[in-house]
Image: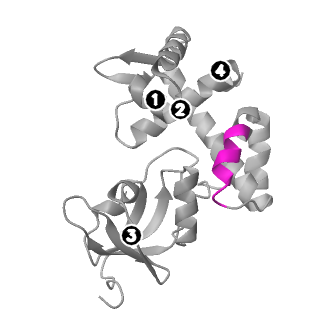
Amino acid sequence: MDQVTEVSAQGEEYLEAVCRIRDRGALATPTEMANELALSPPSVLGMLKRLEEQGLVTYTRQTGVALTERGQICANTLRCRHRLAERLLTDLLGMPWERAHDIACRFEHVIDDEVEKYLLVALRHPTTCPHGNPLDNKAVESWRPLATLSPGQSGRLRRIMDESTDILNYLSQMKLLPGVQVTVCAAAPSGGPLTVEAEGLRFALSRAMADRLLVEYEENTCGCSNL
C-alpha cells in the first residue's frame, strides 16, 4: 500500500516542512515550523503530537523535530511527487517556472503510485524539478552555496533550494535559472550582499539568498566584465 495515503494532507505539509528546515541546516523547532507553515506554535505542537502518535516524527527540545524512518520515506515520496508535479506544469502545460511550485503544492497530494509511474514515463524520467531539486532527494556533494564563492569566482547554477514565490520571481527577472553561469563580482563586508553577474546582468543578492543557491564551481573562469 502507498504509505503516503495513510497520512493526512496537513500531516504531509508538516513532514515536508521538517525537510525544508533541515535542508537549510536549521533546527526544526516548533517555532521554526510555525514560521515555515504560517501557523501558531500551539497549533504546530498539537499536530506534532499526532504525528508522533502515528510514528512519523520524534521531538525533543534538544534535537528539535526529526523524522522517523517511516516519516522520512513518506517525506521523500511527497517531495518526489511535488517535483514531478512541477515538471508536469512547466514541461507539458507550459506554466511559468516561478508559478509551478505553489500550484504543485496542491497537486502532490493527489498523486499516487500508479499516477507517479505514468508521470515519470510521460515526462521522460526527469531527474530534477524545474528549479534543480533532485527527484531522488539526494544531494550532490560537489555543489556548493553561491555564498561560498570569492569575488572573481564562477559557478554553474544547479539548484534553487528556496522555492518561495518572491524568490523565484526575482531570480526569473534576473535570468538566474538552473544551468546559467554566475560570477561573484564583489562581496560587501560584514555579511553584506554579493554583487553577481549572470547572462550579462549585474545585480545584488543577499547572503541569505546566495546561501540557498547551489552552484557547480568552475575553475579558471574569467571574472565579471568591466571590473
**Residue under the image location 58 percent in, 47 percent down:** 135
Residue at disc 2, secondary structure: loop
Above or below residue 107? Residue 61 is above
Label 2, label 3: how far apart the Cα atoms are: 28 Å
**The residue tagged with tag 1: helix, strand or loop?**
helix
* Whether label 4 touches label 1, CB < 8 Å: no
Residue that mark 4 sits on: 7
Q: Quadrant of the N terminus?
A: top right
3D distance between C-alphas at marks 3 and 1: 29 Å
What residue does disc 1 label? Answer: 33
Q: Amino acid at mark 1?
A: Met
Q: Nearer the viewer, residue 216 or 110?
A: 110
- The part of the image, by quadrant, that contains residue 212 is bottom left
Q: Mark 2: which amino acid? A: Ala
Q: Position of residue 189 (x, y in %)?
A: 19, 65
Residue 57 position, x and y percent, is 47, 19
Instruction: Determine which residue is flagged by label 3.
Output: 204
- Label at residue 38: 2
Tell me which amino acid carries mark 4: Val
Tell me the distance, in whole angstroms, between the alpha carbons under discs 1 and 2.
8 Å
Magenta residues (range): 97-106
CA gap, disc 4 to disc 1?
A: 18 Å
- The answer to whether 215 is drawn above or below residue 25 in the figure is below
Q: Which label's residue is closer to the chain start, 2 or 4?
A: 4
Camera-near label (1 vs 2) is 2
Residue 179 can be seen, yes or no: yes
Q: Are marks 3 and 4 in contact (CB under 8 Å)?
A: no
Q: Is residue 181 left or right of residue 89?
A: left
